[in-house]
Amino acid sequence: MKITFPHMGDAYIPVKVLLDTAGIEYIMPPVSGKGLLEQGILHSPEFACLPFKTIMGDFLYGIEHGADCILFGGGCGQCRFGYFGKLQDEILKSLGYNVNFIYLDLSNISVKEVLEKIKPLTKGKSMLTLLKAIFYAVITVFKVDRINKLSRFTRCRELNKEQTNKIISLFHNKVQKARGYKDINKIIRSTVKELKKVPLDKKFKPLRVALVGEIYVAAHPQINFEIEKKLGSMGVEVQNTLGISYWIKEHFIKKLLPFKIKNRDHEAGKEFMKTDDIGGHGLSSIGASIRRAKMGFDGVVHIYPLTCMPEIVAQSTFNEVQKKYNIPIMTLIVDEMTGEAGYTTRLEAFIDMILMKKKASAALHSPDTSRLLNNC
């Protein structure tokens, strides 16, 4: 039995660690491939969002290359992501593919549920080996997150342009060929050392922009046109408020604790949306924008796939958020028809606008201007 799984940014790295450590055979779709998305679009409903079509393409690649089992997650709630797996399973059956669909309920996931769901794949494996596999996978999530944070810091400050991007590209090339936690951990450690050696312009003060929105698009460079690299090359330090480590903390680690820890972004969002949930990460998008404004960030980029209802609801509050907290917010909506050139132009215009706003504010508060205003 061979398993396949969809990509979502760097999630493939801890999944590889999990499956390698547990001794489970798998077929991993290419990290990037235009052809996969085209296949996903061909066999998906026209109204489905881009994440659905991207995931569908990954499944088709895995099955066509020998996988007979799919590992995927879902859950309940207002977001349609909870229904992806069921619909995709039906589509694959209609195409004549008979595969075993292992479906994890991500809204209430636990170690016990993971072990129970992957039981068909783990015959003959000891409980210790499986627990070790889960432990190593979770650790890897946070180690990869450290690399991403370092790259966001160095990319906008580096003296030798593109050096950070080359290090990250080499990191992914090595990881895709590596097997198991030990080898991947070595690659992570060496990559951290390389990033720390990148020569930086220590006098440069970059703009700080937060990335909020739908988690799949925000975390997946292949469908967000590598937005973090684009902004970094413009001299912007990005804080991605979403990602794999965010999801693990909110939906896995916090549920293991004997006490409840509230999501601060989620709670802050209730100021403009008087409800406990609008689905997906809608409330968190609002709250993250508010909290980053209070932290002194220069702007917010809100990104989501076309037809994503939770983010459409969140977007409806942003005019009020911008007025109250004086922070520019730009929304980018992506689907398979989005053109990269126009997308990049909008980002550049947004950053130019922030720079002009900062310069105007600095001029207004300069000593010479203050004296002139006082004499008027």
Image (cartoon, rainbow, N blue to C red):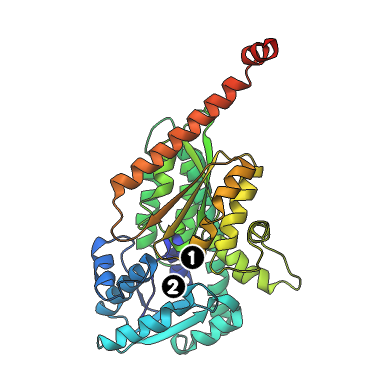
Q: Is residue 329 above or below residue 363?
A: below
Q: Is residue 243 above or below residue 150?
A: below
Q: Is residue 242 above or below residue 94?
A: above
Depth check: 85 or 342 in front?
Answer: 342
The three-letter code of the residue at mark 1 reads Tyr
Q: Circle 2 is placed at which residue position?
A: 20
Depth check: 126 or 81 in front?
Answer: 81
Q: Is residue 99 left or right of residue 309?
A: left
Depth check: 362 or 105 in front?
Answer: 362
Q: Residue at x 66, y 64 (%)?
A: 274
Q: Is residue 66 left or right of residue 194?
A: left
Whether tag 2 and tag 1 are in contact, CB under 8 A, the answer is yes
Query: Which image quadrant for residue 268?
Result: bottom right
- The image shows residue 171 at horizontal and vertical percentages of 40, 52
- Per the image, label 1 sits on a secondary structure element best described as helix
User: In this orientation, does residue 308 appear?
Assistant: yes
- The image shows residue 116 at horizontal and vertical percentages of 54, 87
User: In this orientation, does residue 183 appear?
Assistant: no
